[in-house]
Image (cartoon, coloured by chain):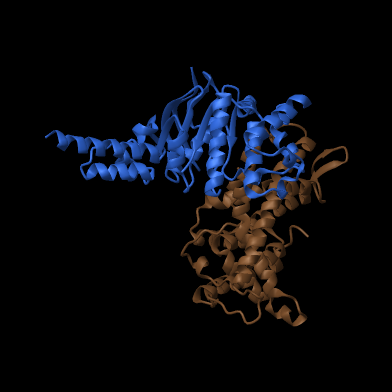
Chain colours: A blue, B brown
């Protein structure tokens, strides 16, 4: 069964005013249980709106959002339950920290779920481990942490609710390259361990390509592609018309192909690209030798 | 949503009112407010209210926006209106124990309601048609005589500019933080008042923290550009009185004279 099913969802901001803007236009797709989905799109393509719909922060004008087969707006009063099941990490989540200690801040979500003290403690410890927060940091004030640590603490605050679906909106924005890599591999580890559904929104094609099972491409409020990373990036030209850039290595492959070298343009990592080129070269070398 | 607040939002335009000098607009606004309260009978009040409505029409800003800014203070208007209903003397219309509605009370209620509504309407004209920079610039210039008494007029005006400039930023930030905390199960829509106030803490603290951070960044940026207060500071845009100001001034002088005449020649309805 699909984890989340979106049926003909449309949403318009500022209806009836001069700022009226159609953010989502008849979007339908399914997210599989346990899948790692990447969402890419140009600024204003509706991807942030889309993810806020998934956990009930926004309500669609029309269409339905089914979480494990149930409409999340079936009982509007119980929308909080949906938010516990669909955890959402916003952009720059470190700005939401407010408690005296990191531990208290991470337990804010679980506390709202009315869990027992032991359960909360266990969830906090788990979340801290997944995000690589050292135990001694837990009793510090969140405002004394470094930027990267704050980010981890905030993400831990959502992971601690143990959601079935975890949504991360640009989790690595503004981090240094090393911090980026570490954070993303931690998210990947989390996904591999918990086997739950993770949705990652990002601008960085490299990151998305590396860790997602499938990629959803948004453009002007519509979902234009939903396929494996390889299939999506092999349509590089189309992506470029939407103002999106394919990963560097895919671009090189595309250029090589245009020059008449028969490489596969679906290469996503430098290693794959390297092997692809190597394969072509050896094929080329062996071909004339046979003549 | 927090973003829907229109009170005090600049709407760019090219109307006669937009072209007026900020100083003239501020002074005229003050005078109009005084005369709204000077008007003591229905005729005088109608005159000043109609004149204000005319100004609203001249701004060519959709009346819906004005209504929206009135909506914010609707509760205050109704509250004072109803309160005034029971306060007054004269012929008694309705009575229940010690509460009574009298002719004077009804007049009071109508007057207070129209006065506040007109007040908000004409004040909205100022904020809708004047950019925040022009507005504070105007205030600074009008207050500049106070410099003689060592009042830091420029600094005050600068603080106001900055405060106005950051209102939309803070509203947006509030929205974001509220969403983030709601995503963590914050419940801001139900429960007793005390619980709701408590639920605001997770929003207010991050908001404070980020305001201080912004203030710090801004101070740093200003210092980097050698800002050192008002002394010797020149302006990019210098305010000029124009023909539009003369027209407005002339029009309102006539209106004010009319209000005074009405007050003199007709009996006062309210004290």
- Residue B179 appears in view: yes
Residue B43 against residue A96 in the figure, above or below: below
Q: Nearer the viewer, residue B238 or A139?
A: A139
Q: Nearer the viewer, residue A257 or B170?
A: A257
Residue A285 versus residue B244 in the image, above or below: above
Among the 4 quarters of the image, the one containing residue B218: bottom right
Q: Quadrant of the C terminus of chain B?
A: bottom right
Measured as percent of width and height from the top left, residue A98 is found at 72, 44
User: Quarter of the image containing the N terminus of chain B?
Assistant: top right
The answer to which quarter of the image holds residue B215 is: bottom right
Report the side of B154 relative to A73 (left or right): right
Residue shown at 55%/25% (left/top)? A196
Query: Looking at this rendering, what residue extends furthest in the front direction?
Result: A289
Q: Residue at x 26, y 44 (%)?
A: A256
Q: Is A158 in front, or is A75?
A: A158
Query: Percent x, y for residue B180?
Result: 62, 39
In this view, the residue farthest toward the left is A291
Q: Residue at x 75, y 29 (%)?
A: A121
Picture coordinates of residue A272, whole percent (x, y): 37, 36
Q: Residue, x 65% and y 73% (percent of image)?
A: B140
Left or right: A158, with B104 as reference point: left
* Residue at the extreme right: B98
Visible in this render: residue A73? Answer: no
Instruction: Locate residue A221 relative to residue B48 in the image: left or right.
Output: left
Along the viewing direction, whichever of A291 and B113 lies nearer the viewer: A291
Q: Quadrant of residue B143?
A: bottom right
Count of marks, rendered view: 0
Question: x and y percent of residue A1 in the render?
Answer: 48, 17
């Amino acid at each position: 069964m699909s984890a989340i099913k979106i049926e003909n969802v449309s949403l318009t901001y500022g209806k009836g005013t001069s700022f009226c803007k159609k953010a989502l236009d008849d979007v339908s797709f399914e997210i599989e249980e346990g899948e790692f989905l990447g969402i890419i799109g140009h600024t204003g393509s509706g991807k942030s709106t889309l993810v806020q719909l998934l956990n009930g922060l926004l309500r669609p004008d029309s269409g339905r959002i089914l979480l494990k087969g149930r409409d999340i707006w079936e009982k509007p009063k119980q929308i909080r339950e949906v938010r516990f099941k669909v955890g959402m990490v916003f952009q720059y989540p470190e700005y939401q920290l407010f408690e005296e200690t990191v531990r208290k801040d991470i337990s804010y979500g679980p506390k709202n779920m009315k869990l027992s003290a032991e359960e909360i403690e266990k969830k906090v410890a788990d979340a801290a481990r997944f995000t690589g927060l050292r135990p001694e940091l837990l009793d510090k004030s969140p405002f004394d942490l470094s930027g990267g640590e704050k980010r981890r603490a905030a993400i831990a605050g959502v992971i601690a609710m143990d959601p079935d679906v975890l949504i991360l909106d640009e989790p690595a924005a503004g981090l240094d390259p090393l911090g980026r890599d570490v954070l993303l591999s931690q998210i990947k580890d989390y996904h591999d361990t918990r086997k739950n559904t993770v949705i990652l929104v990002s601008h960085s094609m490299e990151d998305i390509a590396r860790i997602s099972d499938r990629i959803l491409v948004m453009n002007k409020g519509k979902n234009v592609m939903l396929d494996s990373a390889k299939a999506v990036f092999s349509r590089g030209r189309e992506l470029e018309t939407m103002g999106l850039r394919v990963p560097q290595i895919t671009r090189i492959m595309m250029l090589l192909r245009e020059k008449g070298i028969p490489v596969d343009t679906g290469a996503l990592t430098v290693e794959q690209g390297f092997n692809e080129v190597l394969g072509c070269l050896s094929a080329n070398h062996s071909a004339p030798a046979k003549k | 949503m927090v973003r829907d607040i229109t009170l005090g939002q600049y709407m760019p335009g090219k109307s006669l009112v937009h072209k007026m000098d900020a100083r003239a607009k501020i002074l005229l606004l003050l005078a109009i407010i005084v005369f709204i309260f000077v008007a003591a009978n229905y005729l005088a009040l109608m005159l000043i209210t109609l004149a204000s409505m005319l100004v609203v029409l001249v701004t060519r800003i959709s009346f819906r926006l004005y209504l929206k800014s009135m909506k914010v203070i609707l509760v205050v208007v109704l509250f004072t209106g109803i309160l005034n209903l029971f306060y007054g003397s004269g012929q008694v219309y309705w009575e229940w124990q010690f509460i009574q509605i009298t002719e004077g009370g009804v007049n009071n209620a109508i007057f207070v309601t129209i006065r506040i509504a007109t007040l908000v309407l004409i004040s909205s004209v100022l904020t809708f048609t004047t950019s925040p920079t022009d507005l504070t610039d105007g205030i600074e210039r009008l207050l500049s005589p106070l410099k003689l008494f060592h009042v830091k007029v420029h600094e005050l005006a600068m603080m106001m500019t900055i405060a106005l400039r950051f209102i939309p930023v803070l509203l947006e930030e509030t929205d974001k933080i509220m969403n983030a905390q709601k995503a963590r199960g914050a419940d801001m829509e139900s429960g007793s008042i005390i619980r709701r106030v408590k639920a605001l803490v997770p929003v207010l603290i991050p908001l404070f923290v980020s305001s201080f951070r912004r203030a710090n960044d801004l101070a740093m940026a200003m210092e980097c550009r050698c800002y050192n207060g008002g002394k010797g500071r020149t302006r990019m845009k210098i305010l000029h009185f124009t023909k539009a100001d003369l027209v407005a001034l002339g029009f309102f002088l006539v209106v004010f004279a009319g209000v005074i005449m009405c007050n003199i020649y007709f009996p006062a309805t309210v004290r």
